[in-house]
């Protein structure tokens, strides 16, 4: 079961989730990382859920077309759209850098 570390507003939030978990879906049903993960659409359209991956990026799939459209060059800085990720390994994220500038 993946361990999640989320840095937000200077605090560190940790939790363990089931394998193949989407953190935005979990937050939507008020489970960790609720209420500490910012998100809106859940569909890769708004970039509100954008996080910088501090550790564990090597276990993530390549960015999909929605992430490429919303994040552009920020992908090279380690940003991902959390609503587009199904977590299968430990991961450390930060959402401390806001607002994330998007291309749209
Ligand atoms: S919640 Fe809108 S892009 Fe992820």
Image: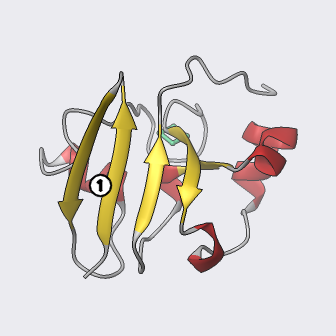
Q: Is residue 88 above or below residue 86?
A: below
Q: Is residue 100 above or below residue 85?
A: above
Q: Residue at x 39, y 72 (%)?
A: 90
Q: Residue at x 30, y 82 (%)?
A: 19
In which quadrant of the rendered image does the N terminus lie?
A: bottom left
Q: How far across and how far down the image is residue 60, in percent?
A: 60, 73
Q: Is residue 101 above or below residue 24?
A: above
Q: How far across and how far down the image is residue 39, in percent?
A: 40, 34
Query: What residue is disc 1 on?
Result: 25
Q: Residue at x 44, y 64 (%)?
A: 91
| Pick the front one: 28 or 51 | 51
Does residue 102 appear left or right of residue 10 in this picture? Answer: right
Instruction: Identify the image's colour scheme: rainbow, by chain, secondary structure or one colour.
Output: secondary structure
Q: Indicate the quadrant where residue 99 lies.
A: top right
Local secondary structure at mark 1: helix
Taking the view exactly as shown, the residue that stands out farthest to the left is 30
Q: Residues within 10 Å of mark 1 (few under 14, many from 20)?
A: some
Q: Indicate the quadrant where residue 2 lies.
A: bottom left
| Pick the front one: 22 or 58 | 58
Does residue 4 appear left or right of residue 61 in this picture? Answer: left
Does residue 89 appear left or right of residue 60 in this picture? Answer: left
Q: How far across and how far down the image is residue 66, in percent?
A: 71, 51
Q: How far across and how far down the image is residue 77, in percent?
A: 77, 44
In which quadrant of the rendered image does the C terminus lie?
A: top right
Taking the view exactly as shown, the residue that stands out farthest to the right is 73
Taking the view exactly as shown, the residue that stands out farthest to the top is 99
Q: Residue at x 19, y 40 (%)?
A: 34
């Amino acid at each position: 079961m993946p361990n999640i570390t989320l840095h937000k507003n200077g605090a560190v939030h940790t939790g363990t989730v089931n394998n193949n978990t989407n953190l935005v879906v979990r937050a939507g049903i008020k489970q960790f990382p609720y209420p500490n993960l910012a998100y809106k659409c859940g569909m890769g359209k708004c970039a509100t859920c954008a996080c910088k991956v501090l550790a564990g990026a090597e276990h993530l799939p390549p960015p999909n077309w929605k992430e490429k459209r919303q994040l552009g060059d920020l992908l090279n800085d380690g940003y991902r759209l959390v609503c587009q990720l199904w977590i299968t390994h430990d991961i450390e994220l930060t959402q401390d850098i806001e607002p994330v500038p998007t291309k749209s």
